[in-house]
Amino acid sequence: MEGDTWRRDVDYVAVRRVVDNDLPLPVLQPKEQRVAAELIFQAEVDDKDAARRLGISERTVARWREAAADVVA
């Protein structure tokens, strides 16, 4: 079952709150982290702030950003 604000295990309200840095930040599930990361990369948020928002390491952010750039290139 899916709702208006979530689909395939992704709560888009939670994702948007993280992307917008709307405190307190929700804890995202792995799929939600990846969706939010893509949007954060588009917004050109630095790795340190992205890691804080996503609840992951800066190294993971850097790897995900590099992988996203490889897909675009």
Image: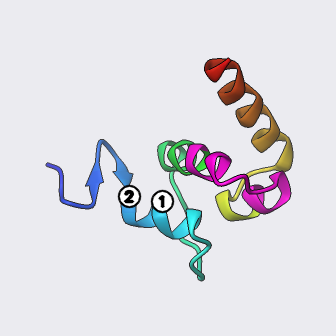
Tell me if residue 44 comes above or below residue 61 in the rendering.
below
Tell me if residue 51 comes above or below residue 16 in the rendering.
above
Q: Residue at x 38, y 50 (%)?
A: 10
Q: Is residue 56 left or right of residue 59?
A: left
* The furthest residue to the bottom: 23
Q: Residue at x 18, y 57 (%)?
A: 3
Identify the image quadrant of residue 43: bottom right
Q: Is residue 31 left or right of residue 10?
A: right
* The furthest residue to the left: 1
Residue 68 drawn in magenta: no
- Three-letter residue code for mark 1: Val
What's the magenta bit mostly, secondary-structure-wise? helix
- The percent coordinates of residue 47 (x first, y second) are 82, 51
- The percent coordinates of residue 20 (x first, y second) are 57, 70
Q: Is residue 45 left or right of residue 71?
A: right
- Label 1 crowd bin: few (<14), some (14–19), many (20+), radius 10 Å: many
Q: Secondary structure at mark 2?
A: helix
- Three-letter residue code for mark 2: Tyr
Q: Residue at x 48, y 42 (%)?
A: 31
- Label 2 crowd bin: few (<14), some (14–19), many (20+), radius 10 Å: some
Highlighted range, magenta: 38-51
Q: CA distance from mark 1 to mark 2?
A: 5 Å
Q: Secondary structure at mark 1?
A: helix
In this figure, which residue is indicated by the disc labeled 1?
15
Q: Which mark is residue 12?
A: 2
Identify the image quadrant of residue 65: top right
- The percent coordinates of residue 34 (x first, y second) are 56, 42
Asked whether disc 1 touches disc 2, contact meaning CB atoms under 8 Å apart, the reply is: yes
